[in-house]
Image (spheres, grey):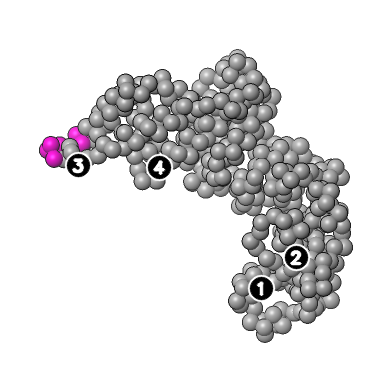
Amino acid sequence: MNIYLVGGAVRDQQLGFPYKDRDYVVVGATAEHMLAEGFKPVGKDFPVFIHPKSKDEYALARTERKSGVGYKGFDIYASPDVTLEEDLQRRDLTINAMAQSDAGLVDPYGGMKDLKAKTLRHVSPNFQEDPLRVLRVARFAARYAHLGFTIAPDTMKLMQEMVSSGELKTLVAERVWQETSRALGEKSPDVFFDVLRQCCALYAIFPELDALFGVPQPKEHHPEIDTGVHTIMVLQQASLLSTSPVVRFAALTHDLGKALTLPEYWPSHHGHETKGLAALKKMVVRLRVPNEFASLAEKVMEFHTHCHKALELKSSTLVKLFESLGAFRQNSELEGFLLACEADSKGRTGFEQRQYPQSDWLRKAHVAANDVNAVQFIKEGLAGKEIGKAIHDKRVYVIEQLKKESL
């Protein structure tokens, strides 16, 4: 029985890139051997075991044969006779098909060569058997773009052919969202969506985003003009402002309504803030997007223009905005909202470095309004709805006074 460290840990060790998980492949063993050594089996589809102490994953060497459609359409063959090279051949990219043991690096498919060339290249033609790999490659491109990695032309061509075949339609929502949410947490999440667009997968998976490309905007506010280009730029800015995938998703989806406004309303897109809510809901339901992501995205979409005009808004309108954002509750979404709106303001050609005083003003106004509570009104003998109205009115007053002092 021989044990090898494989996959991401080997790849990132060679890159000097941080990693957490350590996965191993076991050659020359059976499930009975693993159980006898105290390993705990996990899952039903794959021969994978958990180490009793380290909790790392150990998988028996296996091969896979395409037997149906989708990423689950495979027959798994695990046997002591399966070699390490056979196990590595079923992996997606050459940089993920290396193994490490005490004897040294095992690299039968040129992973180190591609690491040095900063190239994401498929291991074999069997790559096209799993449609999820289109998203995985896009995610790896997002992870390593800042290091200069690009996708090999022949791999991109294969991804385009996979999209054309219609296989991506077999992907289940949970797997699509898992790859997407992980991509949103990478250093360059915009690259994920750019790669999907290059291979035509954006239309297949995120049609609401794909529809934004080619939709014009007013040049004085959007020198980049194209709404799709603006959307990618906003995501880039969001990535500089926040590491939160939730904030980044809200920034990404804030302008979906611009694809739904009639051409006669171009390029102003009047009312796009509310028109996009239906498209966002459709995406959220289809991909089973978690509530935390959906909630902030909805608020940023509906109220981002309010944020941009914050210095001009009435005090009463500001209080209503805070109330709509749940800013006076414990789990306030205000900070995420402000970051996504700032990203929108800066995600425009030539505007990347401009200041966004609206955020500072709204934070200051919120602090002042949030100091108002029910205690003083209860002491004054108010009850029920009277208290709520009194709190609202006092918050309006407090912000109005702050406005006179600050603006």
Q: Is residue 95 above or below residue 239?
A: below
Which residue is labeled 4 in the image? 332
Q: Quadrant of the C terminus?
A: top left
Dot 1: few (<14), some (14–19), or many (≥20) neighbours within 10 Å?
Answer: many
Q: Could you tell me if residue 317 is visible in this image?
A: yes
The label on residue 49 is: 1
What whole-number distance in Å separates the C-alpha atoms at marks 3 and 2? 61 Å
Secondary structure beneath label 1: strand
Q: Which residue occupies the foreground of this view, 29 or 15?
A: 15
Q: Which residue occupies the foreground of this view, 146 or 80?
A: 146
Residue drawn 66% across the image and 39% down it: 190
View extreme (left): residue:
381
- The x and y percentages for residue 122 are 83, 52
Which residue is labeled 3 in the image? 375
Q: Are marks 3 and 4 in contact (CB under 8 Å)?
A: no
Which residue is labeled 2 in the image? 6
Which label lies toward us, 2 or 1?
Answer: 2
Secondary structure beneath label 3: helix
Residue type, mark 4 in image: Ser
Residue type, mark 3 in image: Val
Residue type, mark 1 in image: Phe
Q: Quadrant of residue 142?
A: top right
Q: Which residue occupies the foreground of this view, 97 or 216?
A: 97
Residue drawn 66% across the image and 69% down it: 57
Secondary structure beneath label 2: strand
Residue type, mark 2 in image: Val
Dot 3: few (<14), some (14–19), or many (≥20) neighbours within 10 Å?
Answer: few
Task: Specify which label sits upstream in the sequence, 3 or 4.
Answer: 4
Q: Are marks 3 and 2 in contact (CB under 8 Å)?
A: no
